[in-house]
């Protein structure tokens, strides 16, 4: 609920009558008003003339961009145009769909980048290799689960990674009250504070804990899959001989903790496991997330009460058709990284600088993303972006990426446009929500779909007849949203706009899930690529047992920050260090600290806290004053899906002497 004084947003409050939130809000949501009224807001299109970005009309901006894009395409082909589907237009339903039309109209398979290779390839990869469909995303049955395991996930801050939890404290407390909640994380997080138990492994080594648990379940149960499985014997052979001692040694934790965790799982029978970016941004993401699925499959927790459920879709109803079996998510990767696969058509974000330097990519259309703060290795990305013929950015606040852009196009923000829930399967309910525009449009901002469609027309690309010529026509934005709610959806557009929120019953257990698994011959719990990755990782880590480990950092989300945005809320650019590591490096609490890797360095403020395990530091991402991507490297990329290593990276630290 938003309180207005004329066009001014003065307060944002939770709606106590809302069936889901019941009045709960988070700092990020409450910041919408400050974001809208930000003094530096971009309200007019801008174009680079000489060395400066200057305000221009929409006609001049779009005409110039179209002419230059057409020139690039005609000279070098559509593969010379890279596109980034960022969260800016990613949260704009009709704008995002129009951006997809733009991409398809380029023809062929030009370079496509998205947040997938920043923090999520493991989830899509495992869903395909094990479950045969990329849209399978297990969610904990919070109403009934009595054994909940978080691995590298802090939903008290993030509200879940692809799970959309509302008021997570209520769900976590309720689960802990009737059963047990365990958190595996190098940092004693906000979620760990609400948990029954906490285990603090070395970053990227949590896979060893899950591997030992799976081996023990195979040997001593509870081995009770709810659906057919294939690869059982291959999995047994791969895990053979992996002892509790080895698992604890690799993870850097006590054997007793692992044995007590196993006892808890056996006492409950079923388990819900949720992984977050602490897993998906690590070098071992694929095997950790894979083993989390295997643990749930073997204990009969998949699509069963007390375990996890799968979202059936709201706009597209998965039970209404036979799901295709998509068990090979790998697609061709970038020419400059011949050993790296793409994943479901996306190229690794790490490839962008090299592709620009090689002359393969000459133009980038950035649909709402802070490339410099989000992509790895800002040290090489920044100079590469300056060499582009075109860097066109959709953005409403200035940042390092807009400063490097040739064209900047501001589109309507969240309170200036009506909206529906495009990413329905990421929610915690089978529901659809609609929000109307709240305030008039600032300056000359236009609808995202209108900007993209106007660019497409200038490029000679086909634009659907239903797309209005002017987004300022009454009902134009609503009409574009209505086209997204097709007749096959669970409600009509009119129904959701009339009520604001529509929820449908969840079929759980779901016959469509069991039918899909049966069609593919059972869960594929031993995919050869993952088995091989496991063997290589195990061999390397067992060889390192007993050797000293270098201090490394883990990436961290913050309650009052949303990735690269909302810096104005004041979340600190700090580094959490254990007292032992601070003392060893001569660092005092509150002191400025230089953090260095082979790629670069940043300066942060020391936050000395025993909540972090020794040997590990925690650094938040998305800060412009201390951009963690000066520490990351385009050279450390997962060959299976192109995920860059953003966590568990060795560092050197020293106090900044004034």
Image: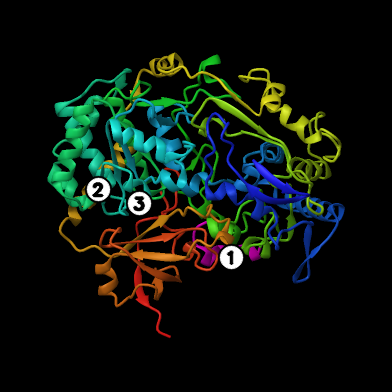
Picture layout, residue 438 above or below residue 517:
below
**Residue 357 visible, this orientation:** yes
Marks 3 and 2, how far apart at CA:
11 Å
Nearer the observer, 372 or 432: 432
Residue 383 left/right relative to 180: right
* Secondary structure at numbered mark 3: loop
Q: Are marks 3 and 2 in contact (CB under 8 Å)?
A: no
SS majority, magenta: helix
Q: Residue shown at 78%/60% (left/top)?
A: 46
Quadrant for residue 40, please give it: bottom right
Tell me the crowding category of disc 3: few under 14, some 14 to 19, or many 20 or more residues within 10 angstroms, Cα based: many
Q: Residue shown at 24%/31% (left/top)?
A: 235
Let me know if residue 226 is in the magenta part: no
Q: Tell us which disc is closer to us: 1 or 2.
A: 2
Picture layout, residue 145 above or below residue 506:
below
First to last magenta residue range: 375-387
Let me know if residue 383 is in the magenta part: yes
Residue 288 left/right relative to 233: right
User: Residue 131's x, y, as percent?
Assistant: 40, 27
Which dot marks residue 199?
A: 2
Nearer the observer, 195 or 475: 195
**Residue 334 visible, this orientation:** no
User: Residue 426's x, y, as percent?
Assistant: 51, 34
User: Residue 285's x, y, as percent?
Assistant: 37, 45
Residue 631 left/right relative to 463: left
Dot 1 or dot 2: first in sequence order is 2
Q: Which residue is tagged 1?
A: 382
Q: Which residue is tagged 3?
A: 189
Q: Are marks 1 and 2 in contact (CB under 8 Å)?
A: no
Marks 1 and 2, how far apart at CA:
39 Å
User: Residue 515's x, y, as percent?
Assistant: 42, 14
């Amino acid at each position: 609920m938003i309180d207005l004084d004329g066009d001014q947003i003065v307060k944002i409050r939770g709606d106590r009558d809302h069936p889901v939130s019941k009045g709960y809000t988070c700092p990020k949501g409450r910041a919408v008003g400050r974001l809208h009224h930000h003094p530096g807001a971009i309200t007019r299109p801008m174009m680079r003339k000489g060395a400066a970005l200057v305000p221009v009309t929409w006609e001049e901006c779009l005409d110039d961009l179209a002419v230059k894009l057409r020139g690039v395409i005609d000279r070098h082909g559509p593969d010379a145009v890279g596109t980034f589907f960022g969260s800016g237009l990613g949260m704009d339903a009709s704008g995002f769909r129009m951006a997809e039309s733009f991409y398809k109209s380029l023809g062929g398979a030009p370079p496509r980048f998205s947040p997938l290779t920043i923090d999520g390839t493991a989830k899509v990869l495992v869903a395909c290799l094990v479950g045969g469909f990329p849209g399978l995303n297990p969610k904990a049955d919070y109403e009934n689960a009595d054994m909940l395991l978080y691995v590298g996930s802090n939903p008290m801050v993030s509200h879940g990674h692809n799970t959309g939890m509302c008021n997570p404290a209520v769900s976590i407390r309720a689960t802990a009250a009737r059963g047990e909640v365990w958190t595996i994380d190098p940092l004693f997080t906000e979620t760990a504070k609400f948990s029954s138990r906490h285990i603090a492994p070395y970053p990227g080594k949590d896979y060893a804990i899950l591997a030992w648990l799976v081996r023990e379940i195979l040997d001593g149960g509870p081995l009770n899959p709810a659906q057919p499985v294939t690869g059982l014997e291959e999995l047994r052979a791969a895990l053979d001989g992996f002892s509790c001692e080895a698992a604890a040694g690799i993870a850097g934790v006590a054997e007793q903790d692992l044995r007590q965790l196993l006892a808890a799982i056996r006492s409950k029978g079923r388990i819900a496991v949720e992984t977050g970016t602490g897993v998906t941004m690590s070098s071992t993401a694929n095997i950790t997330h894979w083993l989390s699925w295997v643990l749930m499959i073997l204990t009969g927790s998949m699509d069963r009460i007390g375990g996890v459920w799968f979202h059936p879709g709201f706009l597209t109803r998965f039970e209404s058709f036979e799901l295709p079996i998509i068990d090979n998510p790998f697609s061709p990767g970038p020419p400059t990284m011949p050993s790296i696969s793409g994943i479901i058509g996306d190229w690794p974000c790490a490839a962008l600088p090299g592709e620009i330097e090689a002359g393969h990519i000459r133009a980038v259309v950035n649909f709402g993303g802070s490339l410099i703060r989000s992509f790895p290795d800002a040290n090489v990305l920044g100079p590469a972006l300056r060499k582009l013929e075109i860097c066109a950015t959709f953005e409403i606040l200035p940042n390092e990426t807009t400063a490097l852009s040739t064209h900047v196009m501001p589109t309507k923000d969240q309170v200036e446009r009506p909206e529906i829930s495009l990413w329905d399967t990421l929610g915690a309910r089978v529901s659809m929500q609609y929000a109307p525009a709240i305030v008039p449009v600032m300056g000359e901002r236009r609808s995202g779909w209108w900007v993209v469609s106007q660019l497409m027309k200038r490029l000679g690309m086909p634009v659907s007849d239903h797309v209005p010529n002017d987004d300022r026509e009454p009902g134009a934005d609503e009409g574009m949203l209505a086209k997204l709610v097709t007749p096959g959806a669970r409600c009509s557009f009119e129904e959701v706009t009339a009520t604001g929120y529509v929820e449908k019953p969840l079929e759980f257990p779901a016959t469509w899930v069991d039918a899909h698994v049966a069609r593919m011959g059972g869960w594929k719990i031993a995919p050869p690529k993952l088995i091989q990755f496991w063997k290589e990782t195990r061999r390397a880590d067992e060889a390192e047992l007993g050797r000293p480990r270098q201090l490394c950092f883990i990436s961290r989300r913050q309650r009052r920050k949303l990735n690269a945005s909302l810096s104005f809320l004041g979340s600190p650019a700090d580094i959490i260090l254990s007292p032992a590591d601070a003392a060893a490096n001569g660092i005092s609490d509150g002191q400025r600290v230089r953090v260095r890797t082979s790629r670069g360095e940043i300066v942060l403020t020391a936050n000395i806290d025993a909540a972090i395990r020794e040997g590990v530091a925690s650094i938040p991402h998305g800060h412009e004053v201390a951009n963690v991507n000066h520490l990351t490297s385009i050279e450390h990329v997962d060959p299976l899906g192109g995920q860059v290593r953003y966590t568990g990276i060795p560092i050197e630290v020293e106090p900044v002497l004034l």
